[in-house]
Image (cartoon, helix red, strand yellow):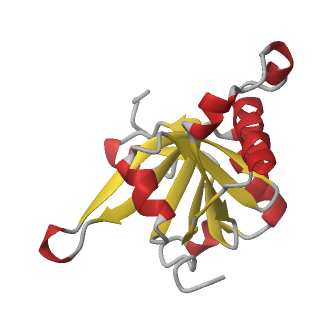
């Protein structure tokens, strides 16, 4: 736990079990990657949805070398990545108490570029396999041009947390008698 991963709201929903966090990351497909672009009065946050994969104790992110997000991230700036799995809609007797059952992982850290050829190819394979398990067996190998044309970053999973909501709606007592569904 770090200051950035300590839950301040609904701490009873926090899950610290590393295997549960990894299972949620392994199940998800889309990560939202956030970083602050520029400096001073021009600084602003940017959040981009991306495919990702977990590989051991790191998240793999990839994209075009021209990507502003990846260029900024590989320059050593902190990044925040979120993955959310929607498990159920929770419909209550009032709109106020509608909610979701979910598993949400937040990762903070500094990503590093994978530059070694074999490691980069293995990471690209892992990204495909995470998205569609078994798919690489049906595909040709990545070409040299494809590998050179892709930036791959590894984000250590050292600073991460997960919040989980499960269960039924929390209705107010006065709403329980309502004929609302």
Asked whether residue 30 is in view, the answer is no
Residue 175, how many percent across, how many down?
39, 45
Name the residue located 67 percent from the left edge and 56 percent from the top edge: 114
Q: Position of residue 93 (x, y in %)?
A: 41, 39
How far from the left and from the top, in percent, is residue 131? 69, 30
- Residue 58 percent across, percent down from the top left: 72, 59
Residue farthest to the top, as pictured = 138
Residue 137 quadrant: top right
Above or below, 117 against 181 in this view is below
Q: Is residue 127 above or below residue 134?
A: below
Which is nearer the eye, 15 or 41?
A: 41
Q: Residue furthest front?
A: 144
Q: In the depicted view, which residue is nearer to us: 176 or 26?
A: 26
Q: Is residue 162 visible?
A: yes
Furthest residue toward bottom:
3
- State which quarter of the image contains the C terminus: top left
Q: Is residue 89 left or right of residue 126?
A: left
Q: State which quarter of the image contains the N terminus.
A: bottom right
- Examine the rendered structure and indicate whether residue 77 appears above or below residue 136: below
Q: How many numbered discs?
A: 0
Q: Which residue is pictured at 75% across the width and 40% down the height?
A: 121
Which sits in the foreground, 151 or 7? 151
Going 40% across and 45% down the picture, which residue do you hit? 67
Image-quadrant location for residue 29 = top right
In front: 70, or 31? 70
Relative side of 88 to 33, left or right: right
């Amino acid at each position: 736990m770090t200051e950035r991963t300590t839950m301040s709201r609904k701490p009873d929903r926090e899950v610290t079990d590393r295997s549960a966090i990894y299972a949620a990351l392994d199940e998800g497909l889309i990560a939202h990657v956030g970083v602050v672009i520029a400096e001073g009065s021009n600084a602003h946050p940017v959040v981009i949805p991306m495919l990702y994969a977990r590989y051991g104790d790191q998240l793999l992110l990839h994209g075009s070398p021209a990507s502003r997000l990846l260029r900024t991230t590989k320059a050593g700036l902190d990044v925040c990545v979120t993955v959310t799995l929607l498990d159920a809609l929770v419909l209550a007797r009032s709109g106020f108490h509608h909610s979701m059952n979910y598993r949400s992982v937040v990762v903070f850290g500094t990503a590093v570029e994978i530059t070694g050829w074999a490691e980069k190819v293995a990471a690209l394979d892992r990204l495909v396999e995470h998205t569609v398990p078994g798919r690489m067996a049906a595909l040709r190998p990545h070409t040299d041009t494809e590998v050179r044309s892709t930036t791959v970053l590894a984000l250590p999973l050292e600073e991460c947390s997960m919040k989980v909501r499960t269960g039924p709606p929390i209705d107010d007592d006065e709403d329980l008698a309502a004929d609302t569904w």
